[in-house]
């Protein structure tokens, strides 16, 4: 059985949804980021990078990095049909995942939510947040454009929908932003999925 | 096939991969220092304003370092640049994500572009120092988690080595002036001994 280490409402939400969609039994363990549990020895033994999501697999090894976890889960559970077929479709699925995680989340949202990680001086925090909002807003537009002519990021529903979903969740719920049209429709379709509902409830969202 | 790159930027790693594959390709310089990546003609190629971007033979553009690398390796299987076995491929992706998603943008970008993080000169110095401390921690983590021999993966040379290479080049360069831990130091030397790496460095005017 796989064990997911997650924090409620964090980016691990996307992996949590993916596990729920796959439907095989798994365990979900909450890591309290506010209390710094990710820096405690019990967690750094699992992931020395001190980050969620972390997936401990059946063989006891840990897998880190959202895009790698998403790809691995989709590929090792072919019955769930969450892995786009063919190199080109797969490349596009990974491209959108990487962009949502490494740019929209880590460059955009992180500036808004954790400005102290970017600027040591309190006086700079407003400027850091403004820059974060700019990157995040542009990111949502880019994701919206990727949905042109399709309901899901890889055409049909796949692991590629997970990272855009959690950044949309942050935009809509945390920042109270209006999502661009196609992305808003994608977000609504995601929220309507039973697997997503179950995960939102479990994470207390 | 055409690679849009800026000399010595992270695109160097993709440049190395293209040289390793050995098929003809073109390069186009987009100087991020001069802001050429924000000009309309490049935005038409990649609206994200980032390099590397790869214009493929069918006219479509692929972005994001790990994905360009993955796609190049997958579509050129004879070059043996990505592990065939799935678990090893997953580890390859995991390392590339860490190098390109954390080590580069969270560590080195703070050192090289402190103005993206702070607004006045005094803060910039602090951001640079923070970037250096973070980068050191990331490099130490890579060193301590090393499972390969000469190369990052135990399965042998791969696209993940090209990602580690650009990071190590930055670390020892004038802007960061860091000391590499022993395995990373040996890795950089082994990379620089490869003819493909030599060609890429020369073409970017770095050798």
Image (tube, coloured by chain):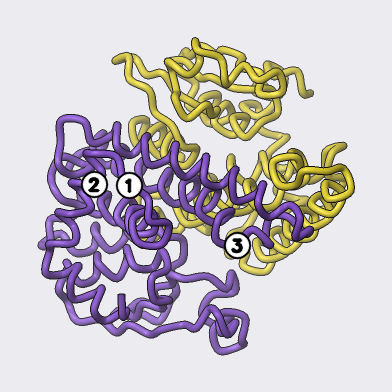
Chain colours: A purple, B yellow
Q: Is residue B53 above or below residue A12?
A: above
- Residue A176 screen position, x and y as percent: 38, 56
Q: Chain of mark 1?
A: A
Is tag 1's residue or tag 3's residue first in the polypeptide sequence? 3
Residue at position x 10%, y 62% in the image: A79
- Residue B33 screen position, x and y as percent: 71, 23
The residue that mark 3 highlights is A114
Q: Residues within 10 Å of mark 2 (few under 14, many from 20)?
A: some
Q: Residues within 10 Å of mark 1 (few under 14, many from 20)?
A: few
Evaluate if marks 1 and 3 touch, with contact meaning CB atoms under 8 Å apart.
no
Residue at position x 31%, y 60% in the image: A72
Is tag 3's residue or tag 2's residue first in the polypeptide sequence? 3
In the image shown, does A195 or B22 lie closer to the viewer? A195
The residue that mark 1 highlights is A178
Using the rendered image, report if marks 2 and 1 lie on a common chain: yes
In the image shown, does A1 or A151 lie closer to the viewer? A151
Task: Tell me the element at label 2.
Answer: helix
Evaluate if marks 2 and 1 touch, with contact meaning CB atoms under 8 Å apart.
yes
Q: From where the camera sits, is residue B181 visible?
A: no
Q: Is residue B25 left or right of residue B150?
A: left
Q: Nearer the viewer, mark 1 or mark 3?
A: 1
Instruction: Classify the position of the C terminus of chain A by image quarter.
Output: bottom left
Quadrant of res A49: bottom right
Separation of residues labelled 1 and 3 (CA atoms): 21 Å
Q: Residues within 10 Å of mark 3 (few under 14, many from 20)?
A: some
Evaluate if marks 3 and 2 touch, with contact meaning CB atoms under 8 Å apart.
no
Q: Chain of mark 3?
A: A
Q: From where the camera sits, is residue A194 visible?
A: yes
Q: Chain of mark 2?
A: A
Q: Nearer the viewer, mark 2 or mark 1?
A: 1
The residue that mark 2 highlights is A184
């Amino acid at each position: 059985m796989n064990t997911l280490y997650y924090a409620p409402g964090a980016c691990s939400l996307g992996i949590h949804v993916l596990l729920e969609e796959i439907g095989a039994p798994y365990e979900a363990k909450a890591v309290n980021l506010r209390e710094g549990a990710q820096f405690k020895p019990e967690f750094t033994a699992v992931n020395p990078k001190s980050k969620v999501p972390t997936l401990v697999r059946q063989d006891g090894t840990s897998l880190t990095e959202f895009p790698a976890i998403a790809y691995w889960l989709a590929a090792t559970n072919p019955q769930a049909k969450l892995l786009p077929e063919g190199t080109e479709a797969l490349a596009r699925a990974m491209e959108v995942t990487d962009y949502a995680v490494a740019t929209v989340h880590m460059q955009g949202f992180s500036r808004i939510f954790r400005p102290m990680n970017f600027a040591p001086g309190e006086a700079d925090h407003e400027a850091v947040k403004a820059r974060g909002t700019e990157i995040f807003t542009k990111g949502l537009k880019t994701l919206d454009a990727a949905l042109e002519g399709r309901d899901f990021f890889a055409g049909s529903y796949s692991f590629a929908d997970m990272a855009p979903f959690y950044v949309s969740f942050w935009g809509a719920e945390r920042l109270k932003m209006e999502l661009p049209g196609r992305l808003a429709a994608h977000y609504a379709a995601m929220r309507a999925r039973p697997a997503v509902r179950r995960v939102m409830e479990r994470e207390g969202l | 096939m055409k690679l849009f790159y800026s000399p010595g930027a992270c695109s160097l790693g993709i440049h190395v991969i293209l040289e390793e594959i050995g098929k003809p390709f073109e390069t186009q310089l987009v100087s991020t220092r001069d802001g050429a990546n924000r000009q309309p003609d490049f935005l038409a190629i990649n609206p994200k304003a980032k390099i590397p971007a790869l214009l493929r033979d069918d006219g479509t553009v692929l972005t994001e370092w790990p994905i360009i690398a993955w796609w190049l390796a997958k579509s050129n299987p004879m070059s043996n640049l990505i592990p065939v076995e799935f678990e090893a491929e997953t580890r390859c992706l995991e390392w590339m994500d860490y190098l390109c998603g954390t080590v580069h943008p969270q560590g080195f970008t703070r050192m090289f572009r402190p103005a993206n993080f702070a607004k006045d000169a005094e803060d910039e110095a602090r951001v640079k120092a923070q970037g250096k401390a973070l980068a050191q921690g990331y490099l130490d983590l890579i060193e301590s988690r090393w499972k390969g021999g000469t190369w990052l993966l135990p399965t042998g040379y791969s696209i993940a080595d090209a990602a580690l290479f650009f990071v190590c080049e930055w670390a020892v360069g004038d802007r960061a002036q860091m000391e590499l831990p022993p395995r990373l130091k040996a890795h950089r030397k082994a990379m620089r001994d490869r003819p493909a790496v030599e060609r890429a460095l020369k073409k970017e005017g770095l050798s």
